[in-house]
Amino acid sequence: MTDERDTPGTDPLDGRILAAWRDLTPEDHRREAPPAGAWEGIARELGTDGDVDADDDAVGAGARVTPLPARRRRPPMTWLAGVAALLLVGVVASVVLASRGADGTVQSRAELSSEGLAVETRSRGTARLVVEGNRVRLDVELADLPDLEDDEVLEVWLIDPDSGGLQSVGLTDGETTLLVPSAVDTERFSVVDVSIEPTDGDPAHSAESVVRGALETV
Amino acid sequence: MPAGPERQGVSRRDAAPDDERSVEAAFLAGPDGLRNVWSAYGDLVHTFCSRTLDRDRALDATQEVFITAWRRRSTFDPERGSLAGWLIGIARHKVLGTLRTEGRAPVPVESASMPQGSVDDVVDRIADRMLVAHALDALPERTRRAVTLAFYEGRTHQEVSEVLGLPLGTVKSDIRRGITRLRRTLAGLDD
């Protein structure tokens, strides 16, 4: 090792570079070209006129989006209908609850953050568990959310930290009021989690959490 | 990860070879640029995805990387790191998202030196190794030999000069250029 400039150790990346370099195999130099038609699929997805607004949060807005080649999986229409119905329920619930104003008693509150989660963005938010008569609702407000692909949605979950059990509460666009089913024990399911979910028809959690936080009694 | 301190006023962007800079400039300039990016880096991204996912999902992920890159191109900063690294960074997130969604482990590569560890570790190491290989392959032969002796073997500039039979000033320039390009390539991965 020398003490001259531009030698290993003078940049934070040097350790990683050297470790990777020492582990290099012929495989790492090999390149496998994508199959024919791959580029055309990208061009079709973005719109051939190339007028996609790169800074538009509504991903794909302004583009003439057409499906990728048939090999690309798309969610079944039944699932999309389910999403639409769930969103409609959420909208109706929001409207109904909004019409009641801010009634109810805040039972617990969670500060949501991306800390410790493997996600690119640093999102944040709050979730409030509100009891109103015999109803329980979860008011979720999120900020600094990641851009979603056009086949992704945000889903709100309640987690039992002891068992790891999950209950889906519904979908959110960043500011949502969701009804918590009465069968859900909110004492047990005391952690709020919001994840990015692909619209692939799989009801399981994607493991791509955006924010998470524990409900604390107010 | 922020770029490290620049040396002698040379920015990371200026340290990139001409062809790399022209692809990056075209990418930022307008809609025709993505086609150039695909030509330059489609193989790299597809190979990375193919080493961690099965064939169909690798192609899906590859296409999604370029679609995402186009839609988020305003976030690419050539002063911080390379476009190749930035694209592999996007691919890394796509691959990990796919693996987590499906609860699968990465498809093992043929090499017996497949690193062991968590899924994230495996994917990260493949990304790092492929980017280092990419950077080394793009260096001129003389630069690659100089930087290998200095960086990989830890030799002094004077020793490199003697081994290669080149003037000390030439060796120093080659080493600086080679190391800067290696760092720039990996720096884009963490943006």
Image (cartoon, rainbow, N blue to C red):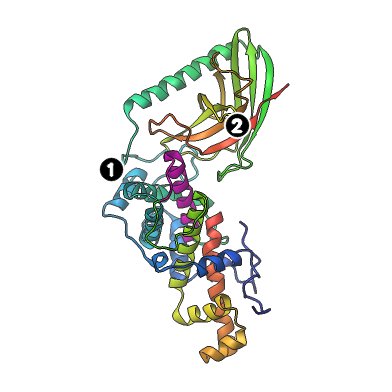
Q: What element carries label 2?
A: strand
Asked if disc 2 and disc 1 are in contact, CB closer than 8 Å, the reply is no
The C terminus of chain B is located in which quarter? bottom right
The N terminus of chain B is located in which quarter? bottom right
Q: Residue A161 — which label?
A: none
Q: Which residue lies most toward the top here?
A: A133
Residue on which disc 2 sits:
A142
Whether A84 is drawn above or below B125: the answer is above
- Residue A106 percent location from the top left of the image: 68, 17
Kind of residue at badge 2:
Leu
Magenta residues span B83-106
Lateral position of residue A154 relative to residue A117, left or right: left
Residue B171 in view, yes or no: yes
Lateral position of residue B54 relative to residue B175, left or right: left
- Local packing at callout 2 (Cα closer than 10 Å; few below 14, some 14-19, many 20+) is many
Real-space CA distance between mark 2 and mark 1, rounded to the nearest whole angstrom = 35 Å
- Residue B50 percent location from the top left of the image: 37, 54
Kind of residue at badge 1:
Arg
State which quadrant residue A180 falls in.
top right
Whether B141 is drawn above or below A193: the answer is below
Q: Which of A154 and A48 is in front in this view?
A: A154
Q: Which residue is drawn at 31% across and 39% down?
A: A67
Give yes or no for residue A16 being in the magenta stretch. no
Residue on which disc 1 sits:
A71
